Image (tube, coloured by chain):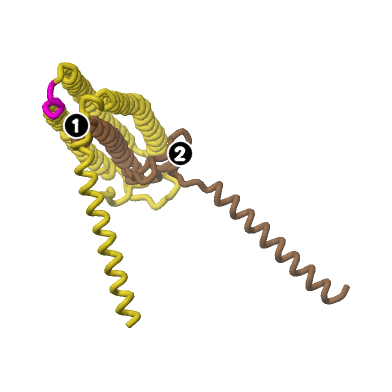
Chain colours: A yellow, B brown
Amino acid sequence: MIKMSFKISLALILCLGFLTFFVNQVIFAASSTPGFRDNVCSRLTSFVSKMEARVSEREQGLRERHQERQKNGEGKVASWDEKREQGRVQAETRMSEFFLRLEARAGTEAQKQAVAVFKTAVRTASEARKSVVDAAITAFRAEVERLLSDRKSAVETAVAGYKSVQKSAFDKAQSSCGSGVDPKTVLETLRIELKAAKDKFEADRRAIEKVADQVKVLNETKKAVFEKAHQDFRTALARARADLKAAFPQSTSTTTPVLSPSLSP
Amino acid sequence: MSIKIKIGLAVGVVILCAGAAFVYYQYLGKQAEPAANLPGISPLPQGVSFGSLTPSVPPVSVDELLDSILADSAFESGLAEEEFSDLNQSLFSESQAISEFGQSYDQNEL
């Protein structure tokens, strides 16, 4: 009996809750839009102020994000270039020291000649790889810079266009209200014009976003160049190693440079 | 000297030695930085792993030398990817701001 009463009470409470929520929604819907419709001219000024403030704030946000990207990007590019350069300097030091030890190990004229050829082959392959990589990076950055510059212009044009149409719509609505045009007509015209501005901006935005895809394509091209350069480099090193190996017998000493059976993949 | 004092002294010495050993190995742990943390080169950001610079241990074989050179090449590829990843992230952030601007007008407000 008590359980049944509890279930019934719970069901009643839930129904009451849904009913209250539903009634509130209906009342709100019935009162808000018709209210604004009836008072569109008296509330237009505050609506215009609100919209203009919001647009201005978001435009500022856009500008800030752009400036942040530019500022951070410049610093990071310098940092990456520095890391790349430091890596190369260390690699050169490592190579030079190893070549000295290898030269010291060369006993015969043939071995000395083989070491000289090996050094030249490794250095030539290394320089060739660096040239290709540096050119790919320069080309990528230049093209990205161009795309981003075009993107910035497109964004500015889209924003300016939107603001212009919005202002024109607000001016027209305010003028219509001043001329005694039916508020419902003023409201409908304003809605249509603001929606048209929004739709136009959305179309411009979709065109602007294609830049991100274009940057991805540029990156894929750059990666392919890097990969080819790396493969060519690997092949050249393997050839140089094979030629050197032919001149030197295998050594078990750990204090002098040795030749191991195979390059790691 | 009573037996209790002797035991107490022995235990005290053991504790002192254990503490000294602990501090010593803690110090050694701090000294043994990973070989990849080379001075002047900041580590890659958290969560981004594009390989690392070859450690500064000199190669003892031709294979080690060539492997280290190839690793440096791979490291450069990683740096380039990091650059693109960062750019992509920035573009995404800007895209969000552009989208927010486009949502300035909500027709439900009229």
Q: Image point 38% across, 41% down: which residue?
A: B45
The circle on residue B38 is 2
Given residues B68 and A81, the one toward you in this image is A81
Compute the Cα span from label 2 to label 1. Answer: 72 Å
Q: Is A121 contained in the magenta span?
A: no
What kind of residue is marked 2?
Leu
Q: What subunit carries mark 1?
A: A
Q: Is residue A157 visible?
A: no
The x, y position of residue B104, in whole percent, is 24, 31
Q: Residue furthest bottom?
A: A1
The circle on residue A38 is 1
Residue A134 picture quarter: top left
Q: Are the residues tagged 2 and 1 within 8 Å (C-beta)?
A: no
What kind of residue is marked 1?
Asp
Tag nearer the camera, 2 or 1 = 1
In this rendering, position of residue A245 left or right of residue A99: left
Region of the chain picked out in magenta, as a range: A181-186
Given residues A181 and B11, the one toward you in this image is A181
Q: Is residue A264 visible?
A: yes
Q: What subunit carries mark 2?
A: B
Q: Image point 74% across, 69% down: which residue?
A: B11
Residue A186 picture quarter: top left
Q: Are marks 2 and 1 on the same chain?
A: no
Q: Secondary structure at mark 1?
A: helix
The x, y position of residue A50, in whole percent, is 29, 27
Residue A241 picture quarter: top left
Quarter of the picture containing the N terminus of chain A is: bottom left
